[in-house]
Amino acid sequence: MFDFFRKYNKIVMIFLFLLIIPSFVLFGVERYQGSGGEVKVARVDGQNITRPEWDAQHRLETDRIRQQSPNVDPTLLESDVMRYATLERMVRDRVLAAAAAKSNVTISEERLSRIFAQDTGLAAFRTPDGKFDRESFQRVTGRTPEQYEASMRAELATQQMLLGVTGTAFTPPALAAATINAFYDRREIQVARFSPESFASKVTVSDADVEAYYKAHTAQFQASEQASIEYLVLDLEAAKKNISVNEADLKTYYEQNTARFGTKEERRASHILITAPASAPAADRAKAKAKAEQLLAEVKKAPATFADVARKNSQDPGSAEKGGDLDFVTRGAMVKPFEDALFALKKGDISDVVETEFGYHIIRLADIKPAVVPPFEQVRATIENEVRSQQATQEFAKAAETFTDAVYQQPDSLKPAAEKLRLTIQTASNVSRTPPPGAAGVLANRNFLNALFAADSLDRKQNTEAIEVGSNQLAAGRVTQYTPAHPMPLAEVKDKIRAQLITERAAVMAKAEGEAKLAAWTAKADGATFGAPVTVSRREAQAQPLAVIDAALRADASKLPALVGVDLGTQGYAVVRVTKVVPRTPSAPEQTQQENAQVGQSVAAAEEVAYYNLLKERFKAEILVPKPAETLPMAR
């Protein structure tokens, strides 16, 4: 057969060509690119947002949050809710960008330059000669300057779009007053509570009741699936271990950075300043210089009088009263001409007149603290750590490739990867598909857990692929033992079921009693028993349930006193007697102004949301993936 292919390979190639090309024409290239190409997760103005774009953006956002808040719960960052929030922000940015483009909103070069000039963060990327360090910027931010400029233009354009709505929001005083008064509204109430605990002794729950409830609600009593695992983590610290540093390199680094490991030379200076700004007329500067030369002659003649002369004549308000004393300074702390003159003096010397942009100085060197450089051995550990840290990022990239290949090529064990990279195999038991509250590190990473509980990992007990679990951090794991989800035996949960049934039935009895009392007291107020009067509001709950507060505030204030019944569910029932409206204490003018401003901000925010929703319809924005539950699933 193989001889046939070798003999007639040209004919076979032509046949395959004729077979494949029409299929490309009929079905398109996308059908050959992984099940229809990249998965679309949202669409705005006819443009798609794909899952890789979504994943990349979420990774950027979580990395930024981790850098700003290292102690943030990783479970929260990797939750479906947070991922969906990232997608919503992406859609919002695309909608506003489309609106800005359609409205021809542009940002002038002058405005952009002014913003960049005022950005203190960008100043860190300028070299001493004023040039912009492009490589440093790209390494730190992960973006090119052009990408940063484009993002700033887009952000400013969208801000300008929204400012047209939020900047013109208007809140009439009557609306502000009605909103604030509703928040501060107060009522004096009396409450009669009917608690389930008072009726629990009257409830009887049989074994048959417990068994019937268990059979009807078996899904409530499931033991979650669990796994015992082993895993490896590769991060920058682990990469450092594989870096070889020789003694010669460490000593060279020490010699090149000697000043950093010790203390610089410090000099204690005193000076007399006769001010003469560079912008002053030449005649004024000449007069100031002549004055300085006169004072120089005095202190040269009597050096011991330097402090007295400075107090009487120096025009530097910060040092004159101290006899011109400037305390100890190092190189780089003073302007260049002053520094050059100071560090050329010997202890006790007085300089000639020194001209700077501030005027004319006479400098006296009072004392010298020599530079102190620790010996190499004393700082060797610090130097080695710094050298390893500098090489760690590059080493991590190499190690990551080795790590990825090793866990894939030998899927039945993590040991080869651990030995190659000198990593420690870690273990964990009772691991579930959903990270429990308080989980940290790799075991809180949703992507890593999803990989562990994938079919291949569970069925074959093979390594997961290398999973990115953080900035410069990879992990791989394998399941060593797996217990699927299963119903818990009745014997383990019968006490819990019995207590639950008692609570539910007692709450029903409490509600019935409360409703009967409400009807009786409404018909005839005599004999009604309530607690002591308390004044409540939405800000002052006075230990009352929120449902009681809401019911009291909804009662008709024109027909007081009024009785209201409140069903508190498993907490029982309450009958609330609303006796009177308690006027609000007037706020100080400053607080009133602040409250009105807060209402105005709320109105502006509401108008912004309404405007954005209008734009979403105009640009046909839609999210194509289901919205997750608003809370993280809890482990049982």
Image (tube, rainbow, N blue to C red):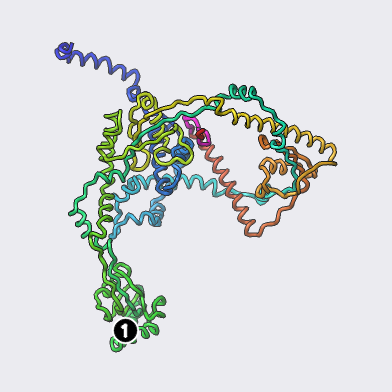
**Is residue 178 in sight in this rendering?**
no
Question: What x and y, as percent, mark residue 262?
Answer: 28, 64
Q: Residue at x 84, y 41 (%)?
A: 527
Question: What x and y, as percent, mark residue 555?
Answer: 74, 41
Q: Is residue 373 above or below residue 296?
A: above
Viewer-proximal residue, 366 or 17? 366
Q: Residue at x 44, y 33 (%)?
A: 430
Question: What x and y, as percent, mark residue 317?
Answer: 41, 77
Question: What x and y, as percent, mark residue 153?
Answer: 41, 46
Magenta segment's dominant SS is: loop
Q: Which residues are magenta?
A: 621-632
Count of marks, rendered view? 1
Crowd band around label 1 with a 10 angstrom C-alpha radius: few (<14), some (14–19), many (20+) = some
Viewer-proximal residue, 491 or 587? 491
Q: Within the image, what quadrant is residue 520 found in?
A: top right
Q: Amino acid at mark 1?
A: Ala
- Determine whether, in the image, residue 362 is placed left or right of residue 94: left
Residue indicated by mark 1: 290
Queried whether the magenta region covers residue 84, the answer comes back as no
Viewer-proximal residue, 422 or 616? 422
Q: Within the image, what quadrant is residue 361 found in?
A: bottom left
